[in-house]
Amino acid sequence: MKKYVALFLLSSLYASNGYADVRCGDFTLTSSNDGFMHINGVRPETQKFTFLGQKEDYNNVKYEWRVATNQPGKWLGMEYIKRNGNKRFLNVQLLQASMDAPREFATYDCVKVK
């Protein structure tokens, strides 16, 4: 529960302090007051937040999301990693209901945008 409270506070502070959004390929990540990062304006179905190093080290974090697509039975599994405060990238995998479907995934470098 503490992790979710910290995540909500982090997202709220990030949103209220006027920080820039993050752009990763075709995806724009925007923090919001509901405690979730929004991807292209859409709230993900699930969100997991992990410190990669020490606790409370917000310069080394990992977010994991599952986002619905406009196609039935398909979701995007996303993993955003921020290291050393400025190196950021986004891994995206198409999750499909069929286990026989070929795996599709991509990695994007991320930059802050105004």
Image (tube, helix red, strand yellow):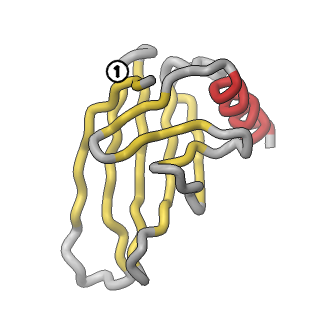
For disc 1, the neighbor class at 10 Å (few under 14, some 14 to 19, many from 20) is few
Residue at the farthest left position? 102
Residue occupying image coordinates x 49% and y 36%? 62
Residue occupying image coordinates x 59% and y 40%? 49
Q: Please name the amino acid that badge 1 sits on.
A: Lys
Picture layout, residue 95 above or below residue 77:
below
Nearer the observer, 76 or 22: 22
Residue placed under numbered mark 1 in the picture: 87
Task: Please state, as top left, top right, bottom left or bottom right, where the N terminus lies in the image.
Answer: top right
- Quarter of the image where one finds residue 88: top left
Q: Is residue 88 left or right of residue 41?
A: left
Task: Assign a secondary structure to mark 1.
Answer: strand
Residue at the farthest front position? 114
Residue occupying image coordinates x 59% and y 62%? 45
Q: Is residue 89 left or right of residue 22?
A: left
Nearer the observer, 88 or 112: 112
- Residue 12 is situated, as x and y percent measured from the top left of the image, at 72, 31
- Residue 11 is situated, as x and y percent measured from the top left of the image, at 66, 33
Picture layout, residue 70 above or below residue 83:
below
- Residue 16 is situated, as x and y percent measured from the top left of the image, at 70, 25
Residue occupying image coordinates x 24% and y 84%? 100
Nearer the observer, 12 or 61: 12
How many dots with numbers?
1
Picture layout, residue 68 above or below residue 51:
below
Task: Please state, as top left, top right, bottom left or bottom right, where the C terminus lies in the image.
Answer: top left
Picture layout, residue 5 above or below residue 76:
above
